[in-house]
Image (spheres, grey):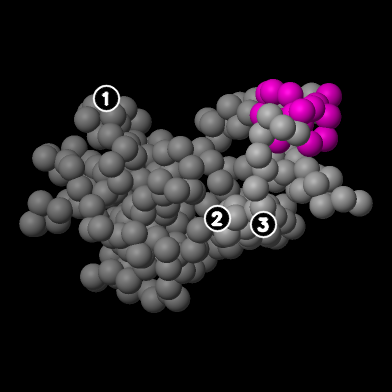
Amino acid sequence: MSSDRIGSIGVRWLGVGLTSALAVFTLGLVATDRLSLFINPAQTPFAVAMALIALVGAVCSFALPLGAEADHGHDHSDPDDHEHAAPSARATGAKAAAIAGGVVATLVGAGAVLLPPRSLSVELALERDTGTAPLFAGADEVTFAASVDTDSFGVGGWAAAFARSTNPDTFDGAPVTLTGFVTPGDDGFRLGRLVITHCVIDAQPAYVPIEADESFEQGQWVEVTGTVTATGQGALTVEPDEITPIDEPDEPYEY
């Protein structure tokens, strides 16, 4: 097999092959209900549509002769029309860079397909902790808190309410049932959750203070049932009635 043909196959693989592999991977995640580990479920129809378009494009690409990608769009029949110099150091370097990029892209694609998907770690949530509530979680609900059912609030919604409420009495006495992971906090612990707007790249940590005497290992998932309480300093906290250790849920994020 000639080097030109090998190069053409490599170009086809880097374009069509990797795109097809990632498209099949995306559809596989949808079929196994695990795409939510990477993107907001609201974006699933868009992801499926793009994956299908990629696969259709990959099938259509086989109508293009192998090596046609390198065609300049003009005739090379007369060798006197162009002077083809020996490969320069620049061209050799570019080819080496392309090969290295292809290897890296293949390894990344293989890892995405072969390795089991996992949720983002608690350590990453702590690294992203800026001490403020997520920008978008529960924003509208907090604004209109007097007219909404707070039973629908998750950790992100309550974190926003605790941080932005100008009238803590609005929430005082509200019952809560929340699920999240344990992180250190004052007078108890913080219940944490990662909130995703579009995908895991924009994941933001949200925390709600839990007043509890029980101690749990950092990262332990728990379900907390209790009541929101306004403190004398005008802050809000959760007084738990029951704290139950649980396994990480199938959908560890809030959206």
The Cα atoms of the two marked residues, 2 and 3, are separated by: 14 Å
Tell me where the magenta segment starts and ends, as one range: 61-78
Residue 53 occupies which quadrant of the picture?
top right
Residue 20 among magenta residues:
no
Q: Which mark is residue 99?
A: 3
Mark 3 element type: helix
162 sits to left or right of 68: left
- Observer-nearest of 226 and 57: 57
To which residue does mark 2 refer? 90
Using the image, determine if residue 248 lies above or below residue 215. above
Between disc 2 and disc 3, whose residue precedes?
2
Neighbours of disc 2 within 10 Å: few (<14), some (14-19), many (20+): few
- The residue depicted at 53 percent of the width and 41 percent of the height is 39
Residue 181 occupies which quadrant of the picture?
bottom left
157 sits to left or right of 91: left
Of helix, strand and loop, which mostly describes the magenta segment? loop
Residue 94 in picture, x, y percent from top left: 58, 54
Residue 80 in picture, x, y percent from top left: 72, 32
Mark 2 element type: helix
Three-letter code for the amino acid on which mark 1 is drawn: Ser
Using the image, determine if residue 76 lies above or below residue 17. above
To which residue does mark 1 refer? 147
The Cα atoms of the two marked residues, 2 and 1, are separated by: 67 Å
